[in-house]
Image (tube, helix red, strand yellow):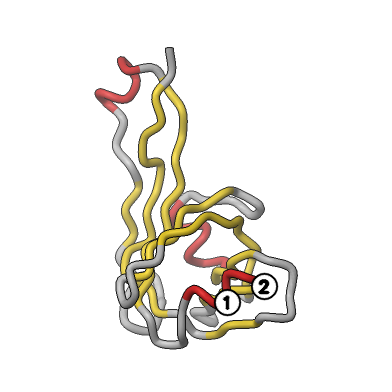
Amino acid sequence: MFIEVLQAKIHNVRLTQTELNYTGSITIDENLIDAAGMIANQKVLIVNNNNGERFETYIIKGERGTGIIGLNGAAARKGQVGDELIIMTFVQMTPEEAKVHQPNNLFPDRNNQVI
């Protein structure tokens, strides 16, 4: 049996752009992707702390060092520039593995830069 547990979390990043006329996804600064241990095209759960929205999409690499966090396509309707987001990935593992698993929690600064 496998259970799903938190793999990684980027906590309280700020939404920097929305692009409605784009194939759906979230664009994330490549520095943040790497520091959190996430990968491009990976499914993510996003929580918007400002409006309570929770939704799933996938990661697109953003330009390294820019701090970009962008909601694209239909997801662009789920937030406004300046909103605080939590971005999470999950992994499946056995309960025994889950008992010792430690998720990678990343807490960037107010400009979405790795501290």
Amino acid of disc 2: Gly
Determine whether the residue tagged by mark 1 lies in a helix, strand or loop: helix
Q: Please name the residue that numbered disc 2 is placed on.
A: 73
Amino acid of disc 1: Ala
Picture coordinates of residue 23 (x, y %)?
74, 68
Q: Residue 29 versus residue 27: which sits nearer the camera?
A: 27
Q: Identify the residue shown where x is 37% and y is 54%.
A: 9
Q: Please name the residue that numbered disc 1 is placed on.
A: 76
Q: How dense is the environment of label 2, judged by Cα within 10 Å: few (below 14), some, or many (20 and up)?
A: some
Picture layout, residue 10 above or below residue 13: above
Q: Residue 79 versus residue 40: which sits nearer the camera?
A: 79
Q: Residue furthest top?
A: 1
Horizontal relation, residue 77 to residue 63: left or right: left
In which quadrant of the rendered view does residue 58 lie? Answer: bottom right
Picture coordinates of residue 95 (x, y %)?
32, 18
For the C terminus, the image quarter is bottom left
Determine whether the residue tagged by mark 2 lies in a helix, strand or loop: helix
Q: Identify the residue shown where x is 63% and y is 64%.
A: 25
In which quadrant of the rendered view does residue 50 lie? Answer: bottom left
Q: Which mark is residue 36?
A: none
Horizontal relation, residue 6 to residue 24: left or right: left
Q: Are marks 2 and 1 in contact (CB under 8 Å)?
A: yes
Q: How dense is the environment of label 1, judged by Cα within 10 Å: few (below 14), some, or many (20 and up)?
A: many
